[in-house]
Image (cartoon, rainbow, N blue to C red):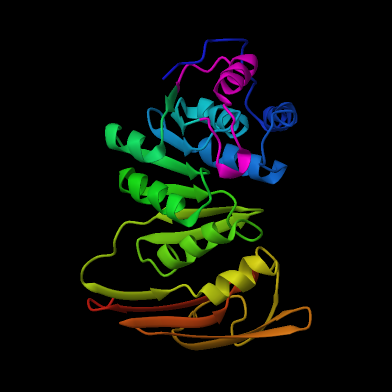
């Protein structure tokens, strides 16, 4: 383990800082797109003082520098975990010295811990809570599973887990793992996908008197992200087309139109029960059913 040395002062906060950071990171070898870098900046800048951002897979420092830039805002800590030997497709490499050089060249960051070890080994020795976990190590299914299983228990309630090279045009093994373990998992809420980064939030469990069933269909994720509906405005016609539930309770229905596609939506809400199924605004499909025995809807 080695801590990078201090260097020149960092950037000022604001949009100019973001643009300057993205521009400076382009020459560092890596695979993060400009939109993905901006996403990492956005989420890392929300992590509170003294909290931890941990990334698995740092390569030559492009993502690490991006996370560090965002972490500066609230003085959060960044932990970089990597063997720096790459994955099987990279051959016989060692990027550690280049990683350290890139960190020193661009930053005055003192709040960085570098752990040169396999993710699974590092997790066994590391104690503490994580606010933001960025998984970008080996993309083999079993390795993604090891990374997730090793670290997700350390992510705080309300924290975020980001997967690189996932949806919509990422690695199949990463996509399969996410579909099997996270879609439909009541402990995690899918937030968004930007290029190949998927964002999940670790949600607190619901009150035990509320019987809740939520299903996030893999079909939805394919349509939502795979064919590019994510974040798209759709025209909606119906009873209350801009609402999920009727403001007066009872039934609501709508028809979402996107190009030549027509997507139905229906919902119902009373004092004790609510559910919906179909296409919501922004082009996403969902199915949710909740029962509140105390009667709070």
Q: Residue at x 32, y 56 (%)?
A: 204
Name the residue nearer the viewer: 176 or 153.
176
From the image, which quarter does the C terminus lie in?
A: bottom left
Q: Residue at x 44, y 48 (%)?
A: 160
Number of marks present in the image shown: 0
Report the side of 266 relative to 16 (left or right): left
Residue 172 percent location from the top left of the image:
58, 61
What's the magenta region?
A: 84-112
Residue 107 percent location from the top left of the image:
60, 17
Q: Is residue 47 among what the camera can see?
A: no
Farthest residue toward the front?
92
Placement of 194 over or under 284, stated as above or below: above
Placement of 136 over or under 200, stated as above or below: above
Residue 102 percent location from the top left of the image:
63, 20
Name the residue nearer the viewer: 109 or 84.
84
Whether the magenta-drawn stretch holds residue 94 is answered as yes
Q: Quadrant of residue 19?
A: top right
Report the side of 152 relative to 222 (left or right): left
Whether the magenta-drawn stretch holds residue 284 is answered as no
From the image, which quarter does the N terminus lie in?
A: top left
Q: Is residue 203 among what the camera can see?
A: yes
Residue 283 percent location from the top left of the image:
64, 72
């Amino acid at each position: 383990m080695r801590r990078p040395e201090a260097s020149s002062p960092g950037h000022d906060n604001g949009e100019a800082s973001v643009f300057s950071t993205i521009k400076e990171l382009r020459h560092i070898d890596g695979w993060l797109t400009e939109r993905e870098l901006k996403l990492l900046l956005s989420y890392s800048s929300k992590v509170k003082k003294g909290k931890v951002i941990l990334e698995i897979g740092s390569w030559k420092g492009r993502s690490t520098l991006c996370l560090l830039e965002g972490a500066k805002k609230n003085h959060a800590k960044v932990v970089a975990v990597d063997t720096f030997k790459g994955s099987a497709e990279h051959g016989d490499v060692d990027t550690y010295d280049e990683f350290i050089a890139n960190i020193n060249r661009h930053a005055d960051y003192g709040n960085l811990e570098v752990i040169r070890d396999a993710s699974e080994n590092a997790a066994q020795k590391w104690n503490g809570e994580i606010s933001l976990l960025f998984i970008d190590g080996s993309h083999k299914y079993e390795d993604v599973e090891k990374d997730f299983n090793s670290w997700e228990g350390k992510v705080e309630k309300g924290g975020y887990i980001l997967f690189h090279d996932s949806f919509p045009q990422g690695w199949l093994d990463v996509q399969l793992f996410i579909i099997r373990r996270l879609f439909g998992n009541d402990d995690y809420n899918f937030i968004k996908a930007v290029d190949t980064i998927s964002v999940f939030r670790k949600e607190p469990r619901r009150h035990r008197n509320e019987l809740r069933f939520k299903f996030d269909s893999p079909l939805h994720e394919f349509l939502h992200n795979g064919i590019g509906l994510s974040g798209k405005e759709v025209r909606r016609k119906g009873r209350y087309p801009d609402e999920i539930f009727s403001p007066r309770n009872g039934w609501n229905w709508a028809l979402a139109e996107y190009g030549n596609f027509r997507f139905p939506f229906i919902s119902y809400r009373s004092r004790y029960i609510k559910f919906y199924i179909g296409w919501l605004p922004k082009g996403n499909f969902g199915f949710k059913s909740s029962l509140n025995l105390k009667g709070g809807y």
